[in-house]
Image (cartoon, rainbow, N blue to C red):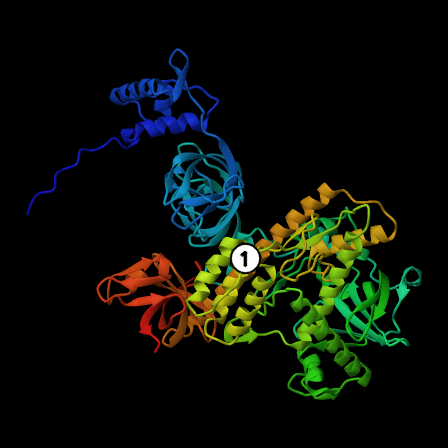
């Protein structure tokens, strides 16, 4: 056996010296350096290293890559153009910068990340070379950190500690001096704040600001999810105190300033576990064959006034967060569940959109303004659904909120049936104009008293849900139209949704083509028609959840802005959020602006509201991520108790390190690692969305049904690993 040659020990710091020197000079492109300063930066001080540095400086100067400004002082010659963008890191430590100057994302290798972290706004320059056909670049400066707080598990040593972050996008552990550990015990889950990242340090320095508890403990993990996204889980004392001292009584003086609609039949339809009812419907038949339908929204802006601690807190939160086992409300409970909640048999201040509608569901007249209303009844969706299906006023015991069968007022039953009829006409009109119908199945858990998942059920949208949805859409659209069409133009909060990007649609076609579905993207009409057909065709099939998710991902993200471009998914030219001010701050802003314009006010400052829109969109995004994480956490908890069972799943993703499998019965998704599939050596085939066995040519492809078993569950990292048993025939 031939002996391996011994390698010469390479002086690592010096081995790629040209690039390192260039990198130092380019990083601080306006400063000059002499050979001593460069040696100090490299942490070398032996003679041979210094000589090499001097030699390399002369070579770089001869190549005109650097210039000698004073004797022995060098600086980079900057020919590269610098750009800024947002870094999107992957778990391997390399990433891409998303930048408007380029049509495609710019690849950044892990050695060119230069201490940037996921989501940071960075300055970078681009090399002439490309990596796998993509531009490649190097980060030169961090313009703005995306976040400064991370959740992780602390490891204590005798005189220092490290926090190992939960997030797989954080590629470094965080060093914590022993006096900044906040009395955390070894193995605790903590929230750590980044303080500094010294030039020569391998890891950033931080301090512990909160001890969350023991990993794997239910409350610890839920609080950790909130902390990871910087979301609060309690109100500061002064905010609670302020809210508790608001006068929430209904007064004669205030009623006199409003349209009094207490005598009109009014009721709410909400999920059976809802605590805050922010919308009610009123209904009456008018003489001229028209119906008056009122959409009454809790008048939050009556209580939440600008420039108060309450308003500041609501703005910061911008949204309520709906986790698996709790709601983190935008407003303290005294408002969200009491004063602003349109509870049955109580008078409430409301902000209303009142329409006169004919039998064809056409709006003939509209009125917007502040009202006082009285809710005659409260229904769960299931109860309203029973009225719609049986066409009677009888509510059977199995859907009744009280658990007992009862008869509702005949007038309410008639109103519900008429509203359902109108909603169906409005919906079909929307579909004909090119709206897209996403009826995504929601996964819900039955939890026992200690918040352990004991079962999974799916929530689907039925007629009663769609009835409420249509009238909320109508109010949102008409309010936006009312202001958007005024001349001169006035600043308003729009909820916009851009057209999908062609490349995303092509990728969707590519994937759904594997299941035998065809899409037609000739124009807007054919695109929406074929998307709707696709969503209809997959309903109830094994690939439904996968295709629904991919279709939603192919869409642009809806967001808040003062610049109206319309709403693609709803096929509306004007759309806003007006109907949920208890749980969304943009709705509070919409109420304030609407009232301001009804009072004859002039256009509000656009720049200020655009900033508030950006903040609201960003907070909505973080809340969605937290909600997803909490579902993932519950799914893993659920699967822990089913370790010995075999499940049928669908391959929902394929990567070069493994396949993702989503279990059909409970929508839990986990990973089978390539290295764990032992019957062959599998390789990733990107073009076929598959992994293929080298010897057997055996293929596991996106959409295939397979049988899996739980291999490992990690509640802390939110990982679920499966063992592949084989194909499901």
Residue 434 picture location, percent across and down: 64, 64
Q: Quadrant of residue 403?
A: bottom right
Residue 581 picture location, percent across and down: 73, 59
Identify which residue, 551 or 725, lies in the foreground.
551
Q: 409 above or below 66?
A: below
Which residue is drawn at the image coordinates 47% and 35% (left, top)? 124
Q: Quadrant of residue 270?
A: bottom right
Q: 271 above or below 570?
A: below
Q: Mark 1 sits on what residue?
A: 625
**599 relative to 276 in the view: left or right:** right
Residue 63 picture location, percent across and down: 34, 21
Q: Quadrant of residue 641?
A: bottom left
User: For mark 1, does the 10 Å Cα neighbourhood hold few (<14), some (14 to 19), or many (20 or more) residues?
Assistant: some
Q: 159 above or below 409?
A: above
Identify which residue, 397 or 541, lies in the foreground.
541
**106 relative to 350 in the view: left or right:** left
Which residue is drawn at the image coordinates 46% and 76% (left, top)? 665
Q: Quadrant of the C terminus?
A: bottom left
Residue 310 picture location, percent across and down: 74, 52
**353 relative to 712 in the view: left or right:** right
């Amino acid at each position: 056996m031939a002996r391996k040659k011994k390698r010469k020990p390479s002086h690592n710091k010096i081995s790629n010296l040209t690039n390192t020197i260039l990198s130092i000079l380019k990083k601080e492109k306006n400063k000059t350096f002499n050979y001593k300063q460069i040696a100090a930066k490299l942490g070398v001080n032996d003679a041979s290293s210094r000589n090499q540095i001097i030699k390399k400086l002369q070579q770089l100067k001869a190549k005109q890559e650097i210039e000698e400004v004073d004797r022995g002082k060098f600086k980079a010659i900057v020919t590269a153009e610098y750009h800024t963008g947002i870094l999107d890191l992957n778990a391997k430590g390399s990433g891409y910068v998303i930048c408007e100057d380029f049509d495609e994302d710019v690849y950044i290798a892990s050695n060119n990340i230069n201490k940037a972290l996921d989501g940071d706004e960075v300055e970078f320059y681009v090399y002439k070379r490309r990596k796998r056909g993509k531009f490649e670049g190097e980060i030169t400066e961090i313009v703005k950190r995306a976040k400064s707080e991370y959740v992780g598990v602390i490891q204590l040593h005798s005189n220092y500690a490290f926090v190992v972050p939960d997030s797989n996008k954080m590629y470094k552990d965080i060093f914590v001096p022993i006096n900044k550990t906040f009395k955390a015990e070894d193995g605790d889950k903590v929230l750590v704040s980044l303080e500094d990242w010294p030039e020569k340090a391998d890891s950033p320095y931080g301090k512990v600001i909160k001890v969350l508890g023991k990993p794997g403990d239910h409350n610890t993990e839920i609080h950790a999810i909130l902390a990871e996204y910087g979301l609060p889980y309690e109100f500061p004392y002064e905010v609670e105190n302020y809210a508790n001292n608001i006068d929430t009584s209904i007064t004669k003086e205030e009623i006199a300033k409003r349209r009094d609609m207490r005598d009109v039949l009014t009721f709410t339809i909400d999920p059976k576990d809802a605590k805050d009812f922010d919308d009610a419907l009123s209904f009456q038949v008018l003489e001229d064959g028209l119906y008056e339908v009122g959409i009454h929204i809790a008048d939050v802006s009556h209580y939440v006034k600008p420039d108060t601690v309450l308003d500041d807190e609501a703005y910061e939160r911008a949204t309520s967060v709906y986790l698996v086992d709790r709601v983190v409300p935008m407003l303290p409970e005294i408002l969200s569940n009491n004063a602003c909640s349109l509870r049955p048999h109580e008078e409430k201040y409301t902000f209303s959109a009142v329409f006169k509608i004919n039998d064809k569901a056409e709006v003939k007249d509209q009125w917007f303004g502040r009202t006082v209303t009285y809710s005659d009844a409260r229904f769960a969706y299931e109860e309203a659904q029973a009225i719609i299906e049986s066409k009677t006023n009888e509510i059977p015991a199995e859907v009744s909120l009280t658990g007992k069968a009862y008869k509702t007022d005949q007038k309410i039953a008639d109103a519900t049936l008429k509203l359902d009829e109108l909603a169906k006409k409005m919906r079909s009109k929307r579909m004909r104009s090119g709206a897209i119908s996403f009826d995504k199945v929601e996964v819900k858990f039955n939890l026992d008293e200690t918040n352990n998942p004991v079962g999974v059920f799916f929530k689907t949208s039925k007629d009663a849900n769609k009835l409420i949805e249509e009238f909320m859409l109508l109010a949102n659209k008409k309010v936006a139209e009312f202001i958007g069409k005024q001349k001169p133009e006035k600043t308003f909060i729009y909820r916009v949704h851009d057209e999908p990007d062609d490349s995303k649609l092509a990728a969707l076609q590519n994937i759904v083509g594997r299941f035998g579905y065809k899409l037609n993207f000739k124009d807007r009409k054919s695109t929406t028609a074929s998307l709707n057909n696709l969503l209809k065709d997959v309903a109830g099939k094994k690939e439904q959840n996968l295709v629904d998710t991919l279709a939603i991902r192919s869409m642009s993200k809806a967001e808040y802005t003062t610049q109206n471009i319309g709403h693609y998914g709803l096929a509306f030219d004007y759309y806003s959020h007006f109907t949920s001010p208890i749980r969304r701050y943009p709705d509070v802003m919409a109420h304030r602006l609407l009232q301001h314009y009804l009072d004859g006010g002039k256009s509000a400052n656009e720049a200020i509201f655009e900033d508030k829109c950006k903040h609201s969109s960003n907070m909505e995004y973080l809340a969605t991520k937290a909600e997803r994480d909490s579902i993932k956490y519950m799914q893993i908890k659920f699967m822990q108790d089913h370790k010995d069972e075999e499940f049928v799943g669908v391959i929902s993703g394929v990567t070069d390190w493994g396949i993702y499998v989503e279990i059909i019965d409970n929508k839990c998704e986990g990973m089978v690692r390539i290295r764990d599939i032992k019957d062959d050596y599998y390789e990733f085939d990107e073009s076929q969305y598959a992994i293929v066995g080298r010897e057997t040519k055996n293929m596991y492809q996106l959409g295939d049904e397979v049988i899996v078993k739980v291999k490992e569950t990690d509640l802390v990292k939110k990982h679920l690993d499966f063992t592949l048993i084989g194909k499901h025939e």
